Image: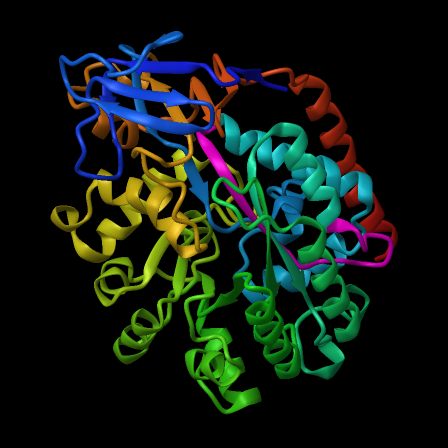
Amino acid sequence: MSFNVNNQTTWINNPLAVYTGSLQDARGGLVIKGNTILELVSLNSEPSYKIDTVVDARQHVVTPGLINAHHHFYQTLTRAYPDALNKELFNWLKTLYPVWAGLDEEMHSLSTEVALVEMMMSGCTTASDHHYLIPVGLEHAIDIQVEAAKKLGIRAILTRGSMSLGEDEGGLPPRHTIQTEQTIIDDSVRLIKSYHERNDGAMTQIALAPCSPFSVTTDLMKETSRIAHQEDVMMHTHLCETIDEEDFCLQRFGHRPVDYLESVGWLNDKTWLAHGIHFNDEEIKRLGKAGVGISHCPTSNMMLASGICRNNELEAAGVKVGLGVDGSASNDGSNMIGEVRMAMYLQRLRYGSANVSHTDALRWATKGSAAAMGRTDIGTLAVGKQADVAMFTLNDIRFSGSHDPLAALIMCGAQQADRVMINGVWRVHDGRVIGLDLENLLIRHRAAAKRLAEKAMTLL
């Protein structure tokens, strides 16, 4: 599923507009050799290197590949699920947990592939997933995701999620959706040893990700931190998404969520958090000092009415702010370029139009997400960085009459990339994933979604 340029030197030349994520001039395009950016070409200049292939970008807005810092791939099977409509987080979860408990390996594989394809088609080159739902029969859930990502050629930061605190013990998930702590620990170590790549340009990485404070025990949070530091991998969890969560932490642990995070050894630069909405000023300063990352999830936060992340204050304090689509049952999509627009407009509601720009939103979706997840080799178009590139045309009716191409990409609502390069390989061309039978994939995915819903109905 690729058009591999091997070790050729490629010039993506004279783009209509380019966002590099830095102050470097690349208006003449960029030169790529193998999987690395070799040179940024300034306006009206020629490359310094012998060029094998020229890609005409005069009709394209060029950006770094977008980076998704939080998702739940399996939820593509329960978009717009009737029983879960018009509910806020805790009630929404209680409605869907029994449905998701019917997930099997085929469903999981198809849902993963659809989520990844949808993201690639929207300009995403690195996708993180938080998979914490591992019912009996799905013990190799992360292995399935690794296989799907490798087949498609997308970078993946896959988190071994977990739930160990059932509703009968004061947690949120039903008992049949949780695992024992020893099972979680053993599998976490296995996955790190099997798949985690540590080099620049890593295509597959593993992080450890207890679902949330209301679905795992304190002991598991502490043990996860110990293993993550021992194995030098990142940690991820949901935190401060809703006021209900804050109330839960106060009642169960006697701490606000950030205090709880510190008490279990998570307040450090190996941690990135999903949502991060309900922090006070003092907590924001502590998070910044500790080097924590946050994945802002605007569409999901609006859908579940959770609140608005304080992006500007977080960044000012030193927090690494990225962007995530969240699950496709609370979004209900996996479109990264669409999420950039949502992030810009939602943040303007908090800070005003003069204080949030389209380049701020692009930064969150590229360099910010990379930094939040501990990556310095991706997220910008710069010499020596990985050749992850998204190219968008402005030919649709929504762009007619626009003047600033880069601003139009976000403000006029781009939905799909024309071309996407990942690790120096073209993976999307003319808006389609190369070599993929999309129609067949969607037929099988829709059938799996129907089967999951029918399975849930039989258990009622």
Is 128 covered by the magenta stretch? yes
Residue 326 sits above or below residue 41 on the image: below
Q: Residue at x 88, y 51 (%)?
A: 458
Residue 372 sits above or below residue 255 on the image: above
The number of numbered discs placed on residues in the rendered structure image is 0
Left or right, 19 with respect to 164, comes to left
Left or right, 458 with respect to 435, comes to right
Q: Quadrant of residue 19?
A: top left
- Does residue 81 appear in the picture of this structure? no
Q: Residue 5: horizontal and vertical position, in percent?
A: 50, 15
- Does residue 164 appear in the picture of this structure? yes
Is 366 covered by the magenta stretch? no
Q: Residue 96: horizontal and vertical position, in percent?
A: 68, 56
**Furthest residue toward bottom:** 254
Q: Quadrant of residue 386?
A: top left
The colour scheme applied to this rendered structure is: rainbow
Left or right, 317 with respect to 272, comes to left
Q: Where's the N terminus, which quadrant?
A: top right
The segment highlighted magenta reads: 122-141
Q: Residue 333: horizontal and vertical position, in percent?
A: 52, 38
Left or right, 74 with respect to 20, comes to right
Q: Residue 423: horizontal and vertical position, in percent?
A: 49, 30
Q: Residue at x 43, y 31 (%)?
A: 388
Front residue of 179/22: it is 22
Residue 203 sits above or below residue 30 on the image: below
Front residue of 224/123: it is 224
Q: Where's the C terminus, which quadrant?
A: bottom right
